[in-house]
């Protein structure tokens, strides 16, 4: 049965120049319920929420969900909306989406480091994993919001500082979005070591395999060392830092004027380039890895398969988060596939088809016995487990039942 929030989401969606995805509608509807009054969460009735964080993967459209909720708050509750983020490119992105997609939200964008932000009723915190910082505490006090909406792909922090949101809304994760086709399929490559020299050598061996590439290192010095090797080989590169002209650098990359762009952390959040084909992720834990790899998962015309490259020593292989279409490890200057080969997949499909047909024959036998007025007898074969399944045994049983059915 549709809830009142479902109708509200439909009205919001009808008024903008974008068709929200099913999971986006569910998330927006759930947040509206939490902000509107008492609601049920995990079978417990809870009071109206003052703060909610939406946990959703990079590329899932958090900006769209945030703008739909900002539109609802402004038009339904008359709230003044303030949108904050750590980096200016994220604020420029939301302003562009608001304008081009027809959301029509009268919002003010401010940096998390702004010391004199305007007052507001709804505060939207983009990349909300940064909400636990001291500067954000000052921002909250200055803005004085009645409601706070957080948006984050990775709502956890390496320094273990807690995020103070009353409710969390989750829906589709990276794995599901890849399987559903909302995010791009990808090939996962594991190299033996991760250094400026090894990364540059890997890229230079097969530039056509990697295409436009984003590379992450721990330090700016490592970025520049890798870029120097690539430039010496005639590859156009850009090293993006907190003090560089990153708008111009990103424009050059988007336009195809440089092939490789390198960064420490600036491009791990809010960098959207659908034409990006490969990301090299420095060794790291789950949060940074998901942020880095997520940059490459947006679907792009002409790029059917993206690539994620990691080192064997990384703490969090991205394959633990999402399933790769194919998987390779570095071996003697080339690549060795470690996925299922075509023969294994064909054999597996044959076995599954055989099980389905066997089940169908047994159901038909039972139905025929019942129709003749006889006693329904289950002649089911013994439980089949992966380690004791025998194709020959199953095939023989299937053929014997088929012959018995013919005689009957």
Image: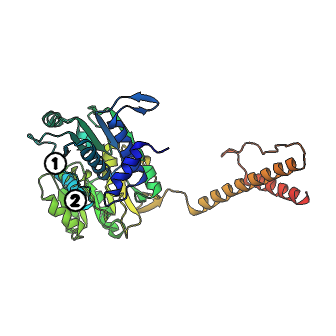
Rendering coords of residue 39 (x, y %): 40, 33
Quarter that holds the C terminus: bottom right
Point out residue 333 in the picture as x, y percentages from the top left corner: 39, 62
Closer-to-camera residue (200/176)? 176
Q: Residues within 10 Å of mark 2 (few under 14, many from 20)?
A: few
Residue 177's mark?
none
Q: Is residue 249 left or right of residue 306?
A: left
Q: Is residue 207 visible?
A: yes
Percent coordinates x, y for residue 209 in the rendering: 37, 67
Quarter of the image holding residue 36? top left
Q: Residue at x 25, y 67 (%)?
A: 259
Q: What is the tally of numbered marks visible in this picture? A: 2
- Report crowding for label 1: few under 14, some 14 to 19, many 20 or more residues within 10 A (C-alpha): some
Residue 352 shown left or right of residue 184 in the figure? right
Tell which of 228 and 104 is nearer to you: 104
**Foreground residue, 226 or 389?**
389
Could you tell which of marks 1 and 2 lies nearer the N-terminus? 2
> Residue 108 has which mark?
1
Q: Which residue is mark 2?
A: 99
């Amino acid at each position: 049965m549709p809830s009142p929030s479902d109708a509200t989401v439909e009205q919001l969606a009808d008024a903008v120049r974008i068709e929200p995805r099913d999971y986006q509608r569910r998330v927006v509807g759930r947040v509206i319920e939490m902000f509107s009054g008492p609601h049920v969460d995990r079978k417990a009735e809870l009071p109206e929420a003052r703060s909610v964080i939406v946990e959703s993967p990079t590329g899932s459209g958090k900006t769209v969900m945030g703008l739909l909720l900002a539109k609802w708050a402004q038009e339904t509750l008359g709230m003044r909306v303030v949108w904050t983020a750590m980096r200016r490119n994220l604020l420029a992105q939301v302003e562009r989406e608001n304008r081009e997609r027809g959301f029509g939200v009268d919002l003010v964008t401010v940096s998390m480091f702004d010391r004199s932000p305007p007052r507001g009723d709804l505060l939207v915190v983009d990349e909300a994993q940064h909400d636990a910082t001291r500067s954000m505490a000052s921002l909250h006090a200055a803005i004085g919001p009645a409601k706070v909406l957080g948006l984050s792909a990775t709502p956890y922090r390496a320094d273990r500082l807690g995020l103070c949101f009353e409710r969390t809304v989750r829906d589709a994760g990276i794995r599901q979005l890849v399987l559903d086709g909302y995010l791009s399929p990808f090939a996962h490559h594991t190299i033996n070591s991760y250094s400026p020299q090894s990364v540059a050598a890997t890229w230079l061996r097969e530039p056509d395999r990697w295409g436009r590439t984003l590379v992450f290192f721990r330090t700016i010095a490592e970025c520049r060392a890798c870029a120097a090797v690539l430039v010496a080989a005639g590859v156009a590169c850009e090293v993006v830092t907190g003090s560089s002209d990153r708008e111009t650098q990103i424009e050059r990359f988007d336009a195809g004027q440089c092939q490789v762009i390198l960064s420490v952390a600036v491009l791990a959040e809010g960098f959207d380039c659908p034409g990006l084909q490969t990301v090299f992720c420095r060794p790291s834990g789950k949060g940074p890895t998901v942020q880095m790899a997520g940059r490459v998962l947006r679907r792009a015309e002409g790029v059917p398969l993206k690539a994620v490259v990691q080192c064997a020593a990384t703490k969090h292989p991205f394959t633990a988060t999402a399933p790769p279409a194919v998987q390779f490890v570095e071996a003697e200057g080339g690549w060795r596939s470690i996925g299922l080969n075509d023969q294994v997949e064909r054999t597996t499909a044959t076995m599954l088809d055989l099980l389905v047909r066997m089940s169908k024959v047994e159901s038909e036998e039972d139905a025929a016995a019942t129709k003749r007025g006889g006693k329904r007898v289950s002649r089911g074969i013994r439980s089949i487990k992966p380690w004791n399944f025998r194709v020959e045994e199953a095939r023989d049983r299937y053929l014997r039942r088929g012959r018995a059915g013919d005689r009957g």
